[in-house]
Image (cartoon, grey):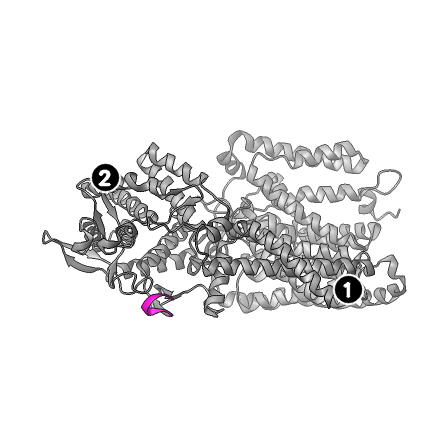
Amino acid sequence: MKKFLRRFFFALGISLVLSICLMGKFVEQFPNFTTHLMNVIRTGNIKNYSGFCFDKNGVPMMLFRRGNKGGTYVYNPVYITMHAFRYYDIWKNKEDYSYFLKYYDIPLTEGISRGEAEKRFMNATKWLLDNIVERQGPDGRIFGVWLYNFGLDADDISVPWISAMAQGIGMEALLLRWQITGEEKYFAAAQKILRSFRIAHDEGGATYKESDSSWWYAEYPRTPSELPSRYTLNGMEHVLISLFKYKELTGSKTAGFLINKGIESLKKHISEFHAPWGSYYDLVGHIANYKYQNINAELTNRLATLLSDKELSGHYRMFLSEQSPYFIRQFILQRPSFYDVGVLLILAFSMTAMIAGILYVCDFRKKYGKLFYEVCGHVFFLVFFNILLKRALSGELKVYVLSPRTPGVAMLLFTNIAAFCMLLFSLPKYLKRPSDAVRTGLVYFCLLPSMLLCPYVVSKDVATYMLAVFIIAGFILTGVAGHADDTTHMESRESLDMEGEKTVIVYKIISIALGLYILIFAPDYLFRYISFTKMYSIRHELKILSSRAPFWGYAVSWLTVFSMGLFAYALAYRRRVWLFLALVLGYASFSVQATKSSLAGFLLIAFIFFVYSMRLKVAVFSWSFGALLALAQFKLQGFVKLYFLVLRVFATPGIISSYYFDFSMQSRPIFFTGNLLKFLGCYPYERELSFVLAKKYLSRPDTNLVGNFIANAQVDLRFLGILCMLGVVCAILKLFDRIAAERGEKWKFFVLLSIAPSSYFMSNTSLPTALLTFGVGVQLFLLYMMTKYRGGSNIFKMLSGEKR
């Protein structure tokens, strides 16, 4: 017990020091997470930790926990407008307001489609229009305001009150609605709000008139005895930016007059907001936290850019340079808030548990040897993919296939779930067979998330879910059979072999059932509820290339054709140098984004190779699978959506890497191209696919899909083309089966998974696109690695069936 307590307090001391040092970085990297966490602790409400909800009309409401209405939902014009701005950005696929919205926690906008964003934007702006309260100014003219009927802190502000910040950004939201729809009532409402900035606070407005030329637009107007508290920097700058937007859209002289008055006052006081350790939130002396420190800087930079003002640009640079350690700013220079103390304690006790666990594992390592390293590797993959998911969701990766609202992110999400489940269910096995537990878990880790992507890509109806169940069941059974054939456990090898044979039989039955399901049941279920219009047109492939890049299009095409021929020559005669050169030429690309995409696919394949190179016994047959795949495409060549599912589901690298070209062309229709008889001059036939890609990812009705090689083969060679395609598919898969027989059982499943469906690179209308999207370069690399160099068999002997 003493040893335990000694270690605990030692870990706690180290954790407190580390937490103090790392607290600022933690809050900066995970602002929304920490906000959510503290809201859960404060409210005890896990379901609605964000503090927001919708009313019956879809307008966001805020949970107000302070003042005389603590614990009730209220309408806050500022946050309603913030949500409206975010909906506008999603709807229009822009980032006009992201420069400051990224520092706000706006959970009700997460994961919504562009159509839903449009609807919510309309609801929010309609609320703003309907809730304007009209008042009469000293000059007899009517102006409009939004009233706050709740206070801030107890006895802090007189209710009801007006916020200049709400007036400014709300006016801008009304202008956006008018600009989009042309409804004059929204412009008239914005004009009424504009007049309110002429009205002084003691006359019913929110403006503090310092002099004839200097006006401050107060976010929190208070009584004259509390003048310093009128000055809040972010609220003032929001108003000025909105006034500039009004002037830009309407040419209003009144807006220009108000901007000049406000800029005069801002320049007079902005230096008072600077501090050596950061900046002040207001002139009462509240120090800006991380959120408002960055908002102050971003808004100042925005104003400086709009007005081309060098003085404001200098203040922006000062805000960036005035940063003090988080702990000093929040705990020493001012009284720490509940939020800051909570974050510090959570960090400290989390690190205490982690350090104590490390100390325990060090003792554990002495008893169990390499188990320590396997557990560390296990945890590393879980942490790595969580970090990757976080960066992908935030858009920081700058890789299109892993950008928000793409299947790559869904892959990462399910990978995280699978990794966590793997870690959870494998822990009891570590003491008995640690290496088996880790390796078996990695099978789930790689395969399960890929297969779970199936309903995400296509549709959430009964047919797709049933198809996903078939696929997942087959791969799970394969994974169960994939225990490590480790030389340290020779005593169990016989039982493992027997288990593997039984599982192969079961897996074949499931695969045959899957094929029958595709052939017989899927069309009825899938297309009973979904209809689509076929659209036929002819587009010459060279015209497509020349429209993108007249010279480089031809150059890259011929370069890749040359590299394919060079690779075939080098592979047949075992010339390593030429193989390497062919690979380099094959991966030649003049697109930075395409290179990133191909690298992402290559890394995924490399990771799967790492898993399957650990002596896993995984058996997959080829002939029946190939026949079912070809027959399914023959049967369903008119059903483009299901064909898309069949092709993509069985190509894990294709799921990840091919979406760069599928989704990157934002300004024109998107085409999936494929043509087996490319070199004979036939053209792709385009078919509309409006419900899968256009609705799910781009919200566009003009997304198209090519019928691909089965349709083309039928058009060009009639039924003979269909028979040829079936033979080609089976021959390719049999080749992989042959490679697996010569190079070891572990290759069969891996090669089939990574190459088989994507081996139709010869049918693609653009060879450079095929190289980058279907992993052809990786195929060549794998064949290169499987080639015998000195006296052994080569690819031609494998094709002919000649034994080594």
Residue 218, image x, y percentages:
27, 51
Could you tell me if the residues under marks 2 and 1 are in contact, i.e. CB atoms within 8 Å? no
The three-letter code of the residue at mark 1 reads Tyr
Residue 517 versus residue 12: which sits nearer the camera? 12
Q: Which disc number belongs to residue 260?
A: 2
Q: Position of residue 457 (x, y in %)?
A: 55, 58
| Quadrant position of residue 630 | bottom right
Quadrant occupied by the N terminus = bottom right
Q: Residue at x 81, y 35 (%)?
A: 573
Determine whether the residue tagged by mark 1 lies in a helix, strand or loop: loop
- Within the magenta stretch, is there residue 66? yes
Disc 2 from disc 1: Cα separation: 71 Å
Circle 1 is placed at which residue position? 430
Q: Who is closer to the viewer here, 788 or 535? A: 788
Q: Is residue 779 left or right of residue 786?
A: left
Q: Is residue 463 visible?
A: yes
**Magenta residues, as a range?**
65-71
Tag count: 2
683 is higher (above) or lower (below) than 76: above
Q: Is residue 512 visible?
A: no
- Residue 569 is inside the magenta segment: no
Locate residue 431, reporting x and y percent: 79, 66
